[in-house]
Amino acid sequence: MVVIAMAQFLISFNGAALPMSIGPMVATFKTPPTTVGTAIVVYALMIAAFVMLGARIGQLVGSKRVFQAMVIVFGAAMLLVSLSPTATIMVAAEGLAGAAASALVPTLVVLIAANFTGRQQQKALGFLGSAAAFAGVMGFLVAGVLGTLSTWRHAFALLIPLAAAIFGLSFKLRPVARKSTISIDVVGVLLAAGSVILMSVGLNRLSHWGLLWSTPNAPFDLFGLSPAPPVVIVGIVLGQTFLQWSQRRQSAQKTPLLALEVLGSRQERSAVISLFIMVVLSACINFLVPLYIMTIQGQTSLRTGLSMIPYNSSIFFSAVLVVKLFDRWTPRRIAHRAFALVAVGMLWLAAVIHNEWSTPPIIAGLIAVGLGQGALVTLLFNVLVTASPKEFAGDVGALRGTTNNLATAVGTAFASALAIGLLSAAVMRHINDNPLIPAELQAEVDLDSINFVSNDHLMEIMGRTTATPEQVVEAVRINTDARLQALKISFSVFSVLALLAIFPSGHLTDYIPPDDIPGEVPSG
């Protein structure tokens, strides 16, 4: 369990340290933030696009061998990141790390299924989820401290000896029999990877290329329309084609890229939908909070990391402790209460949020959201694993990896588009018919690309116009009020989304399995 948890920590720490290192990386490479942000997208996309392929390679070669090989590759990628002389090499190294992680993610589930059963398996899955949450805490904190006091390179260099330690300990793992008779579905790999990549890229670029009409940032336009929605639609079509192709291969007694049995029951589909919504909500929090602290308040990455500790710590503890409820509450009951707790926490944040994140009421709201999300991480993962036979553990891991990374892309895009759209609407409402902001002054400011900016940056922008001191003060007031209103409404929308998730989670089993039955759980 220690080896498996360390491997999960390795993967998640890198993912958490990347967004915290954007500022220091920009200063090192002398490149725009969007270039460095590409590394985050590439890392997540490589995992999401090829995690199903990674599961099949693990079955074909052997999960233990793949685990050991990919830990070495991941460590080498971190060495390349920490020594990278240019942003291009750093992005390529993160792509290599994502490729290694795509094979590691399903392997972790296979190793748990091979080594644990019954209540031990439930606890092991809880530890796996808590390891990811703990890595998030440490990633934010360590990357923030080193990025502020030393260099961002040290945060990634720390993962090199960790990878070496995992490789050394991996020889104690029990080997898992490989399936030499299976084949790799190349067409399925291309369809799945194309679907995930197109959907993720299209969703992530909605705010840059335009939700409907094309913006100047778009690489091209379709009769004036933004290319982002068509890219997403093509990705959805490829995803549907992938499912139909997999059904054809299964009917022909061939091995599909993803065993459709892991989506065979209503309970499993409900768990996947609920997991998707939970990760979307988590991505919304992880986008909006650092955005406000770093971009709007101009705080350091260290301050941002410290501000996120209560939220990530509550996820960590809840993911471990929720297992104690499995003997008393059914999965459906736990899911309903966890989503309700997330909804209440989001609504509380909408009510108490203001221009400071470190006040006790806001911390309490973040903790409530984290407790609900941590419980859902362990619960839904357990439902997926226990609802399928052990031989499909790799497919469950692949499904979880694809769901997590695709939902992260959706959540980030949703939070960005919603918050910026609300901000634009609020700004336009405040300046319309405002005698202090006449049309002549509005023409001097680019109102077509309104975004979240600090008041200091806004004052710099207004300083390049003909605005009087009184008009600058009014512009700052409008910016402050509009930002706060956008954040309050955003958290209210997230609260509604959490409440809506109660409906799909209603199809989870309402049955508590006995301790001595580690197999399938009845669906009702």
Image (spheres, helix red, strand yellow):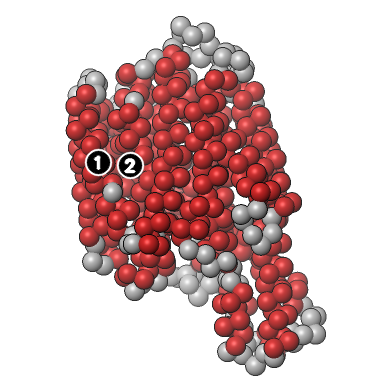
Q: Are discs 1 and 2 less than 8 Å apart at CB?
A: yes
Pick the front one: 457 or 103: 457
Pick the front one: 159 or 445: 159
Q: Quadrant of residue 6?
A: top left
Say which mark, if any, is on residue 10.
2
Who's the residue at 51% across and 40% down the image?
Answer: 313
Quickly name the residue at label 1: 163
Q: CA distance from mark 1 to mark 2?
A: 7 Å
Q: Position of residue 367 (x, y in %)?
A: 60, 41
Say which mark, if any, is on residue 253.
none
Which part of the image, by quadrant, shows the C terminus? top right
Q: Position of residue 515 (x, y in %)?
A: 49, 9
For label 2, count other residues whose C-alpha is less than 10 Å away and answer few (under 14), some (14-19) or many (20+): many
**Position of 74 relative to 517 (above/below):** below
Query: Type of residue at label 1?
Result: Ala
Who's the residue at 58% across and 77% down the image?
Answer: 456
Q: Secondary structure at mark 2?
A: helix
Pick the front one: 228 or 75: 75
| Residue 133 visible in this rendered orientation of the protein | yes
| Residue 402 visible in this rendered orientation of the protein | no
For label 1, count other residues whose C-alpha is less than 10 Å away and answer few (under 14), some (14-19) or many (20+): many
Query: Type of residue at label 2?
Result: Leu
Pick the front one: 315 or 411: 315
Who's the residue at 60% across and 88% down the image?
Answer: 463
Who's the residue at 63% across and 39% down the image?
Answer: 368
- Mark 1 or mark 2, earlier in chain: 2
Taking 458 as reference, is 471 left or right? right
Q: Quadrant of residue 400?
A: top left
Q: Secondary structure at mark 1?
A: helix
